[in-house]
Amino acid sequence: MEINSVVISNKGLEQFNTILKDWIPKNASIALACEDSYIHYSPSIEHMHLTLNEKIHPESVAARVIQTRMKSDIVVDSSILGYPYFVIGYPIYLDQKIAALIIIFPSTYTPEKKEPYRFLTGKQEDTWVPVPVEEITYIESLQKRTWFYANNELFKTNFTLKELESRLPEFFIRIHRSYILNIYFIKNITKDITTNFIIQLKSGIELPVSQSYINDLRKVLEF
């Protein structure tokens, strides 16, 4: 089989699945991604209704693994399957090309809880700066990249919002598909003429709250 110029036989794929099934949990699913596409998907019974697009999403675990060539994991929200599920990716090589081995775990699997990040290392041109999370005002996803703002400075990070959402302290809250906010920098919350919530920060910056995150915001801030 040749996909995206990557040569891999059906027998090779079967052997891959057989080996992995010996150590991954029952009802886990396996996917292989190379370059910008998924080239193999072996779903378990639990994930039969979970389909992978042919093209890799830029914020997916597969994209991050291929970009960084490092192991990556994430807890995906419940909007796809109706319950959260855990995904982990490993960098591998197929036909001398960097690829990603993706394991989608069953709902019964509980990943080891990790300590919240105490700082993020941000990049400014050719300089990397570790920034304590308490100093971060908000984090933004813009043009397929992630940026965070601290002490009136802008930094770039390789983490996606979805990855950060599960590893930041509890005083950070997702308010929009493009924003995660440090609640200690909120000045006030108002509504615009369409009754959508707007958060004004102490710096004067205004951020929108999307409908899907309003209940989370109300619960955290108790209003």
Image (spheres, rainbow, N blue to C red):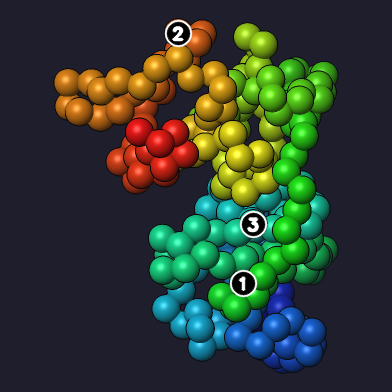
Say whether marks 1 and 2 touch (CB < 8 Å). Answer: no
Q: Which residue is mark 1?
A: 104
Q: How many marks?
A: 3
Q: Is residue 220 left or right of residue 152?
A: left
Q: Residue at x 59, y 44 (%)?
A: 165
Residue 158, image quadrant: top right
Can residue 85 be seen from the camera position used here?
A: yes
Q: Amino acid at mark 1?
A: Ile
Q: In this rendered view, identify the residue nearer to me: 218 or 23.
A: 218
Query: Which comes sooner in the sequence, label 3 or label 1?
Result: 3
Q: Residue at x 46, y 82 (%)?
A: 48
Residue 1, image quadrant: bottom right
Secondary structure under badge 2? Answer: loop
Q: Is residue 21 left or right of residue 82?
A: right
Can residue 4 be seen from the camera position used here?
A: no
Q: Amino acid at mark 3?
A: Ile
Mark 1, other Cα within 10 Å: few <14 / some 14–19 / many ≥20 = many
Residue 214's spot in the image, x, y percent? 35, 40
Q: Which residue is mark 2?
A: 204
Q: In this rendered view, identify the residue nearer to me: 74 or 55.
A: 74
Q: Which residue is mark 3?
A: 74
Query: Which comes sooner in the sequence, label 1 or label 2?
Result: 1
